[in-house]
Amino acid sequence: GLVFIHTESSRYSLPCSPIEMDVADPTYRWVQDGAAPKLFSVTEKGHLLFQRFQAGDSGKYSCTVSYMRHGIPVSQTFHYSILGYHVLGGLDTVLLFHSKLCKDEWTKRFLRGLQDELRQLEMEQHCKLQLNATFCFPSLNNPWDEFIVQVQLEVSLFGPHWDEHCHSQDMEMLTHCYHRTVQHNLGQVQLALMRFFKEHKSFPITGADTSSINFTNEFVGFLKTKQCSGGYGQTKQLLRCLDCCIVCPPGTFSPPKNSQCSPCPIGTYSLTYGVEFCTPCKDGMITRVPGASSMTDCVKKERTKQVVSIAHRIPVLLLIILPVLLALNLIFILSSCYWFYQEYQVSPTRASKMTGSTTRMETVTGFFRIPRQGPRAGRSASDTSDLDSRASQVGDEEPTHGAPSPAVTSNLGAVTDETIPVLTLEDRKDNF
């Protein structure tokens, strides 16, 4: 099953079996999957004990219970996924100190002394105080001889024995107790810090080269925060506390105050739970995809380059093929247009040739006065009757075999008596 344990819990007991087992002389064996063998604190009843639970204690666990039943050895194994979490609540403090020097060496000495002075307050308030950053800049009143040292102090409310008043076995009641405790401790720590800096206004630092340098406190500011610690994110896996921060699994990370578990970037990996920053691969090695959770996911860059180069070649191939296809389509379109143009030009040429042939025939016929065959529109009635009379005469007289008729003979004689005209080259050009 899935088990959630709060960070820095003073004591948490996880049974081997989710139900009571009435067996004689059982033995228990706990193992954490994927982790190096180590000794666990196990009670006589097989409960796994966690003291001051940390994010790195998260993981997959299995418990095997062995016993005898009717003289036959029997064993059962139960599996658990344990995840750390914490409720929201924190305090950021800004401190301003006046000093005559602004050197890193003196500032570091001052911060070490300040951290030692705050140890007693941490134990009393069951909290953790972490000096995160310092800044040094000239004072506005006296910029040449006086400097201001700004110190950022982060307060974590989950110190040793912070949950000493929460002992409920009911998980919802226990989470509710955690919320109340955090809100109560938040106010107590704020009052304790204000009282501390009222009592400790000046922090003298001595050195070999100078007699003494004082860092005098001038300002204390507080900001209540509701952000996840480093290595935790709001994944909404804990239904009884949706705004609680759950530890980030291997392959992911979460910087401080980020509140989101993100996959490790390419070239990095994370092996354990609750990582603030992923571990880079060795020189010359890289991961193929984000979210690597093992050192074996790091491979040589040459192999990855082959995969990446294939992926990059696809757009290049498209850029090469598309212009070729467009050129082929353009050639096809131009060829079709040229073929249509040729067909369109040939058809009128043939028609013009036929028209020219007809004109030349009419010219020759008119020149030699050869009547055209076939009926003509507009022929007179006299011409028609004359033809009919001639036809009747021809029908009444039977012509002599091989001799032409008198009408035809007379026509031929008329033709032979006339002079036959000769066509010169110029006349042919004019006629044709």
Image (cartoon, rainbow, N blue to C red):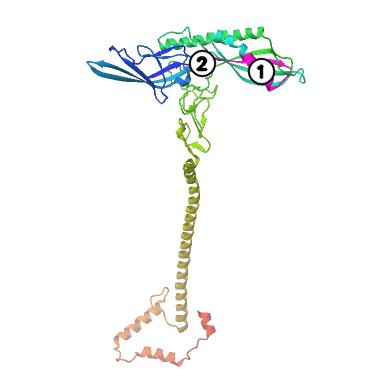
* Coordinates of residue 200 in the picture (x, y in percent): 66, 9
Magenta stretch, residue numbers: 86-115
Q: Quadrant of residue 203?
A: top right
Secondary-structure class at tag 1: helix
Query: In the rendered image of this protein, does residue 177 appear above or below residue 430?
Result: above
Disc 2 and disc 1: Cα gap in Å? 33 Å
For this orientation, the residue located farthest to the front is 208
Determine if residue 245 is in view. no
* Residue located beneath label 1 in the image: 109
Determine if residue 160 is in view. yes
* Residue located beneath label 2 in the image: 88
Identified at 38% across, 12% down, the residue is: 43
Secondary-structure class at tag 2: loop
Identified at 43% across, 92% down, the residue is: 416
In this image, 105 relative to 265: left or right? right
* Coordinates of residue 113 in the picture (x, y in percent): 64, 14
Residue 88 lies within the magenta run: yes
* Coordinates of residue 235 in the picture (x, y in percent): 46, 22
In this image, 195 relative to 42: left or right? right
User: Disc 2 or disc 1, which is closer to the eye?
Assistant: 1
Q: Amino acid at mark 2?
A: Leu
Q: Amino acid at mark 1?
A: Arg
Is the N terminus in the top left, top right, bottom left or bottom right quadrant? top left
Relative to the observer, which residue lies in front, 118 or 391? 118
Q: Earlier in the sequence, mark 2 or mark 1?
A: 2
